[in-house]
Structure formats: structure tokens, C-alpha cells
Amino acid sequence: MKKEKTIPTLVGLAILAVSLIVGLLLTNDTRIFSSRASSDCSPKDLKITNISHYSATVSLTTNTECSVNLSLNGRIMADTLIQPDKTHYFELTNLNPNTDYTFDVISGGKSYKSDNYKIKTAVKPQSTTPTSRLAWGKVFYQDLRPAANSIVYLSIPSAAPLSGLVTNNGYWYISLATSFNKNLTDWFKLVDGVDETIEVLAPDLSRTIVSGNTSKNNPVPDIIIGQNVGLGGSFEQVTQVPLQKSLSVISPKEAEIITVRRPDIFGNAASHAIVVVNLGDIKDSVQAGSDGSWHWYPQVDLPPGSNQLKVVAGEETVVRNFIISVDSGSLAFTASESARLISPTSTPIPSTITSVFTPTPTQIATPTVTPSTSPRPTSTPAVRTAKPATDGGVPATGVILPTIGSLLGALTLIGIALVLRL
């Protein structure tokens, strides 16, 4: 007679106890992990700057290096700084004039909402764009390395808040010609001799504050991270180790949509190089400064539609295609370097843009936990040849139902813990 194979109930209970302990540990670890991730990547110090009748800039910080996106009207906007970092900068373009927008911050995989996450664009000015004028300068660390990816905030009493990013070469630029007044009702009209405040937020979240003057914005004296200068003080020009610079165009960006007829055009070149500018029927030249920076703008209105800029310095040539849009249309985010649309959109993109970079959303695979199944014990009823002498009946031996229940309970607990951990 073949002996029936069974799993003792005590073994099942032991498995359940071990599984219970493991499940609790996994669940507890998940809660700790989630709490830390939420705290470290929560958005802080959110500021809205550069508001115009068609654009705005959103910047914020996180305690640790996190990947952050914005969700604006169902559109997912990528961070200008691309890689995970502690500072985050979003340039939104092609918004409608005098319109309210709300957005969510998606940081560390979690969505954050707030009553402060809203933008109201400016009224479209009826007056002509003011004469081109830049506020610009350089930012360095104390060892004279360019403080790339720092954010510069410029505060002028009668202007709406302004900001700009520090480039890899240490330069920052803010157009005062296309900035708005504090009430967002018209262009900002710059007045010389007005005190201003410049705050630099470095990638390590350190802050440097200096006091400047609107008469000294072209350029602003060099700023050293960690060297704060109060009212009435002065900060000196930095003698940096000379860099061999090649020709570059910082603005406009490729395929950028611009809503002013006389945009600021600027970049870098070799020290004192002659930069030849070709723009439609316009041919002009400008000389780069001793630090290699150059700035030019057209003296006449550019025609609406597609425009091609060709800049030449020596044997180097840079070409940019951009669009002059007289009126701001419906909400449509352009995929320039400063604003990349991650999620696909059904909003038509202007036909004049020949190439738009639209990254394909990355599908993140979620592992499926497949419980490992133990072989179900099979039993062949034993044939009894003699009836026990007992009034209580025959006791059933090797009953596996409690064991199966224990195993299923254990697997369920482990599965729930793993799902929570993912």
C-alpha cells in the first residue's frame, strides 16, 4: 500500500510566520523609501519670472538631484537643464495673452499641486517694442570655473521679475527690451540710475546676492559665487584664464518662435573678432568684446514667418532658423532647446517649422510578481482493513487544507508587499 504524502500543518504555520515577518519588513521599508523620496524631491522655492504676453519661466529647487517635469494643460514639459539636478528651469512659450494657466509639478515620480502653481500672462502691448537692451554678465566659482547652470534672478523695482540661465562658458543674458512692467500691462521702460538686486542660485543651492544699478547692466560686473555684495558696495572684474572660444549663437535658438519684430541676437566668438550677420536682405557686422561676447539686433522690423540667420566669423559659420509670429496663436509649445514637449499632442504645429524634436515617451516596465507554486500534495485514500474500536470515529490524518491556506496567505502577503515596494 502506497503511503500518502502530506505536508504537516506545523510546517505551513512556520512558512506563514516567516512570510509575515518578511512582508512586514518589505512593507515598512517601502513606507520609509516612499517617505524619503517624497521629501527629497518635493518642489521648493518655486518662482515665476519672465512673464510676457506669450511666455513665462518657472524655476524651482529640490533637496536632492531629481527629475522634474511640469504638467500644463495636460502637456508634459521637460526641464531645460535635462539631467536630474537640484535646480530646475522651465521656459514656456506660445501662451495666449492675458490668460490664466495652472500647472502641476511632477517631481520624483510624484505629482504636486498648489494654489500658487498658476500663471497669468501679460496683456499684449499696443506700443512698439522698446530699443534693444541687454542685461548680461558672467558668473564664476571662486576657483574661476564658469558656474554653469546657475540661475540668475534680476529684480528691478518697476519691472516684472526676470531671470536667466548661466551658460557653459559662464555667461548669462536677460533681454530688457522684451520684459514687462510690474503690472504686466505694457513693456518695461528702462530708466538708468535705478538700484537693482541680482541673486544667483548655484547648482548646489547656495545663493549669492549682489546689488547693482541699471546703468551698469551692459555688462554687469563679474559675480563670484559665495561673495555677497551689499548696497553701496562694488564687485570687481575677474581675470579669468583665457579660453579659446568658437563662434556661437545663444539667441535665437533653432526653430524658436519669437513674437517681437526686432529680436536680440547674441552669442560668443574669439576675442575682438568681427562677426558678420546675414538676415534676409540685411547684412551687417559687429565686433566681439575682449571677452568674446557679441550682441546685435535689426534696425528694421523683420517680416512675419520663417527667417534664416547666418553668422560668420573668420572660417566659422552658424545658421539658425526661427519664426517671427506677429500674433500669439492657440496654446502650442514649441520644441526648442528651452521647451521640449515630452508627451505627444494633437495641437497642430505651425507648418513653417521643418523639424521639431519630440522625444518618445519612455515606457517603464512594471515587473509582474508571479507567485511560485508549490506542488499540490496528492493523496490516495488509505484502505482500512479493520475498524478502530472507538466511538469517535476514525481521526483524519495528513489533512492538507490548513497548509494550503497558510501557503496562499503567505504568497498573498509577499505579493502585496512587493507591489507596494514597486
Image (tube, grey):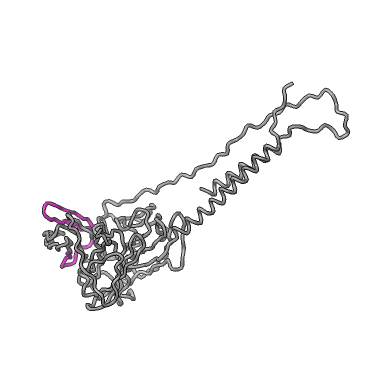
Q: Nearer the viewer, residue 226 or 299?
A: 226
In the rendered image of this protein, does residue 77 appear above or below residue 405? below
Residue 379: image x %, image y %? 71, 28
Looking at the rendering, the stretch of residues picked out in magenta corresponds to 295-322
In the rendered image of this protein, does residue 210 appear above or below residue 69? below
Q: Quadrant of residue 373?
A: top right
Q: Nearer the viewer, residue 121 or 231?
A: 231
Tell me what residue is drawn at x 38 percent, y 63 percent. 60
Residue 15: image x %, image y %? 64, 40
Asked if the magenta segment contains residue 149, the reply would be no
In the image: residue 268, left or right of residue 358: left
Tell me what residue is drawn at x 31 percent, y 51 percent. 357
The number of discs equals: 0
Q: Quadrant of the N terminus?
A: top right
In the rendered image of this protein, does residue 231 appear above or below residue 5? below
Tell me what residue is drawn at x 51 percent, y 56 percent. 35
Q: In this orientation, does residue 53 appear?
A: no
Q: Residue furthest front?
A: 143
Residue 110: image x %, image y %? 47, 56
Asked if the magenta segment contains residue 299, the reply would be yes
Residue 111: image x %, image y %? 46, 58
